Amino acid sequence: MKKILLVLLLCMTTFWSADGQSIAREWNEEVLNAIRNDFARPTVHARNLWHTSAAMYDVWAVFHPEAQTYFLGQTLGDFNIPFDGFESSVPTEEALEEALSFAVFRIMLNRFSSSPGQDNIFTRIFGLMEAKGYDVANGSTDYSSGDPAALGNYLAQQIIEFGLQDGSNEANDYANRFYQPVNSPLDTDGSGNPDMEFPNRWQPLFIEGFIDQSGNEIPETTPEFLSPEWGQVASFALKDEDRTIYNRDGFDYWVFHDPTDPSYIQDGLGMDDAYKWGFTLVSIWQSHLDPTDEVMIDISPASIGNLNEFPETFDEYKAFYDLFNGGDPSQGREINPVTGNPYEPQMVPRGDYARVLAEFWADGPDSETPPGHWFTIMNYVNDNPLLEKRFKGEGEELSDLEWDIKSYFILGGAMHDSAISAWGIKGWYDYTRPMTAIRYMAEQGQSTDPTLDNYHPHGIPLVPGYVEIVEPGDPLQGASGQHLGKIKLFTWRGHEYIIDPEFDTAGVGWILAEEWFPYQRISFITPPFAGYVSGHSTFSRAAAEVLTMLTGSEYFPGGMGVFEIPANAFLEFEIGPTVDMQLQWATYRDASDQTSLSRIWGGIHPPIDDIRGRKIGIEVATDAFALAESYFHGTVDSGSPAVAGDFIFPNPTSDFLTVQGATNDATTVEIYDLQGRRILVTPTNFDANNRTTLDVSALRSGVYFVVLVRGEDEKLMVRRLLKQ
């Protein structure tokens, strides 16, 4: 429990910036901007979002005695953070804003000092500090002086030091310590995949001119696996009972919420092999990326969303994912429960929708990465005037500040734990991606007809109209027939057909399977880490569950979340979409489910990566929300309040003062001025929480002493009060 010498509780006041946002929101926007200007590292940035969110929460909790701090005064693992309470030398509102600002500012200076967009990041955060009148030269950490800046600096220093021993290897720029890939790199400038030895394992990619998801040019042409050892990073709410430890090459891989083995390649079987079916489905779904194929679909909540269960068996997977038409068994919803009106259909070309969905959720250049993307969605929800900011949809509305503090704390913890769980699984199972698996299978031949010369047990299954053999007379046979007998795919044709993305689309058609590419930028192609499980599915489902629990409703405010997509002005590497459209979701879970499908249309994940990631996201969010709520109520671990003694709040105050007394005996509250004169005396009338409220609005501004007296003269508590 945190130690409090004199607790100054945050008054029930909303803190506004010039544009009407809370101080927490302002700094969250700065963190998101910094992520957009840094390297694309979902694990690292989930951790950055968590640490900055927890820092903001801790500052708030210092001024809120019912809540328990996360860092200050706590021991996390083997790391202890001393804290002796804080008595501010300035009014509470000013103290909270200043301490919070210095804490996040110092963490950002540390975490983004080597970012490629450092100039942009630092210009903005120094500008914000200057605009608020804070002296950034104040580096004091002696918070006993009552200086809020010192409190923020101290908290930031402790979080930075904690981060150097939390298992992330931050001191060495998060470098891998043990992991080594078993496959040699695939040269993406060449054809096929001739050198893959282990088709179930991840394969690095050689990409000339590699540009990461944030648009940064990376000198290494063969990016390393990002964060395969992340399972050992200190988490927020992950539990030991949900952890499995595996060892490979002398390193213990920590796997939380172990999904067990993915689908490994089998000999023969064709489309009855779950591995071959899953990766072949990815290629078939990319045949939907043609807006001229005249297939129109309804993408409104009337047709999309409202899934009730996920598949478990291979047969259920085949029923869940529509192999030839794309999508899932969404039922949609007829009526918007908020407005009482039917959801209006929105008919658009399937090729436009699939491309937009793939790029919207791909988190490409200038993106805040998947965990940050969900922070932007949370901010979008928080800005909606229809949102009632009642925690879990219950009780009184919270101030913007308290709502932002709590929502960021919960979402930050859930995103951080999602990264730890998903990447711990990625590191251990080390599973392949469509880019390498599809080319590998096609390199071997086909696995459907053993009577043909190009049969191979690991070959790709033949699917008429989508996966076929190059026969004589085929335009793909080559000038000298060199491609006869090879595998061809009816799918997205790739970047070779895009000369100018301002005007061109690659379209869909027959290509040699050895030339297959995902629907991604040519300078990026595929994220540099294993596929199983999908990080997008894990992050998104966890975030959707958090928003559902936080707001007390599964629905977006007003019954629908909307993102405008303008015609011919949204797609990055080819022109499109051909029509204006809206991405619409009735519920947070519907949005999450579409995120997951986007990664299949984008050529990044097969279904096995997706579903198990969604399930893990649900588990992670449930645990993170429950633990965060216990911090808010001060009931962490013991189930009893973290602050069980006698205290007063808010302090300073201008009108009402609450006194808590840890006694059931008859008591009185007495207030004295600095001259020792008794100004007020009143019997206590404690409620079920041992609290009573006094009206002190008539007192003059100044310093007083509040005394809780039992019987005639037994003083149970003496606290100094600052009356504003």
Image (cartoon, rainbow, N blue to C red):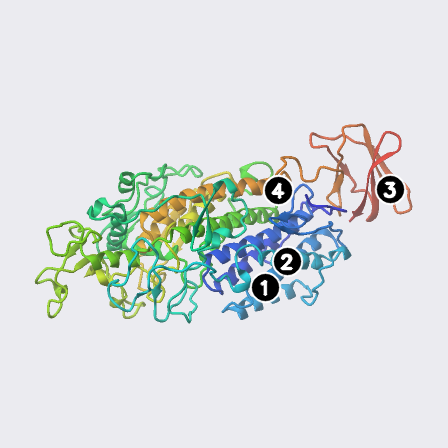
Q: Which comes sooner in the sequence, label 3 or label 4?
A: 4
Name the residue type under label 3: Tyr
Q: Which residue is located at x 72 percent, y 32 percent?
A: 690
Name the residue type under label 1: Asn
Name the quarter where the N terminus is drawn. Answer: top right
Q: Kindly report which numbered mark, 1 or 4, lies closer to the viewer in this rendering.
A: 1
Q: Which comes sooner in the sequence, label 4 or label 2?
A: 2
Residue 378, given in percent of the width and then of the height, sits at 50, 50
Q: Which mark is residue 156?
A: 2
Name the residue type under label 2: Ala
Q: Is residue 148 above or below residue 206?
A: above
Q: Which comes sooner in the sequence, label 3 or label 2?
A: 2
Name the residue type under label 4: Phe
Q: Residues within 10 Å of mark 1 (few under 14, many from 20)?
A: few
In the image, taking residue 551 as reference, residue 22 lies left or right, namely: right
| Residue sitting farthest toward the top | 665
Q: Which mark is residue 110?
A: 1
> Could you tell me if the residues under marks 1 and 3 are in contact, i.e. CB atoms within 8 Å?
no
Label 4 to label 2: alpha-carbon separation: 21 Å
Residue named by callout 4: 632
Q: Which comes sooner in the sequence, label 1 or label 3?
A: 1
Q: Which mark is residue 672?
A: 3
Does dot 4 land on a helix, a strand or a loop?
helix
